[in-house]
Amino acid sequence: MTYQGVLTKMQTEIGNPIQYYLVFEDSFLNVNQLLDKEIEINFAGFQCLNCHKKKKIFRQGFCYDCFYSSPAVGDWIMRPELSTAHLGIADRDLEYEQKAQLQPHVVYLALSSEIKVGVTRKTQVPTRWIDQGATQAIAIVEVPNRYLAGITEVALKDHYADKTNWRKMLQCTAEGCDLILEKSKVESLIPAEVKDYFYSQKNDVYELNYPVLSYPAKVASLNLDKTPTFQGKLVGIKGQYLIFENGTVFNIRGSEGYVVNINV
């Protein structure tokens, strides 16, 4: 059977294990059902997620023009401390930015390749942690806007990583840790503006279990620009990656905006 459509990040459903779905315009695919099966991926073109034109993807599923004009990919996305909507100052589109930035955000510690600090909208818990391939996560603070979350993350970057090493995450080599103990260490490190928002009494640790039959000893990333046709046996799904038996991994989110045919 063939599925065709524009790649967007896999939708997820919390479970044991987590359920993954590829959603296309006219169909969807439960990727868990493909484990231990041969699948073929064929590159068929591009479609910008913003303007929907068949233009080459520049970054994050957007063509060059949309990447530098759409408010959905402003600098404050990757650097929350640059948020200015709480001041009534626009970056690209104040109305859009107010909706996105002026809502509850969570700063967290997560174990993926190592302990890392990160920021997410409260509505994206635990989706954000799943997308990063975290096996454990704990919230540190919940603040009313993205700016406060951003300055908290900046304050903790000197003590924790803020990016996931995707190779280590996919090889599942991270050592175990006590996230409750780590959380107790950060209260003295966060900015004064957010100390009242610290989760002093809340120590819920999320445990996340991924559908992986085997982890690769070495990983090689599939690039559809260089390898437009790929076939292999799927042995795992973690973060936003498909893991194949030969150690090839395919970053679905990193290929957003690519049009593919998937034969299963």
Image (spheres, rainbow, N blue to C red):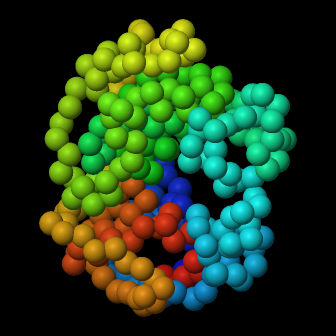
Quarter of the picture containing the C terminus is: bottom left
The residue located at (50%, 18%) in the rendering is 191
> Going by the image, does 243 lie left or right of 64?
left
Q: Residue at x 41, y 9 (%)?
A: 201
Is 259 rendered above or below residue 132?
A: below
Residue visible at 45% across and 27% down in the picture: 155
Viewer-proximal residue, 124 or 77? 77
Question: Does residue 121 appear in this view?
Answer: no
Q: Is residue 50 above or below residue 118?
A: below
Front residue of 13/53: it is 53
Residue at x 68% of width, y 51% of height: 74
Residue 235 lies in what quarter of the image? bottom left
x and y percentages locating residue 61 in the rendered image: 61, 68
Above or below residue 182? Residue 23 is below
Q: Is residue 12 left or right of residue 237?
A: right
User: With respect to residue 179, does 62 lie above or below?
Assistant: below
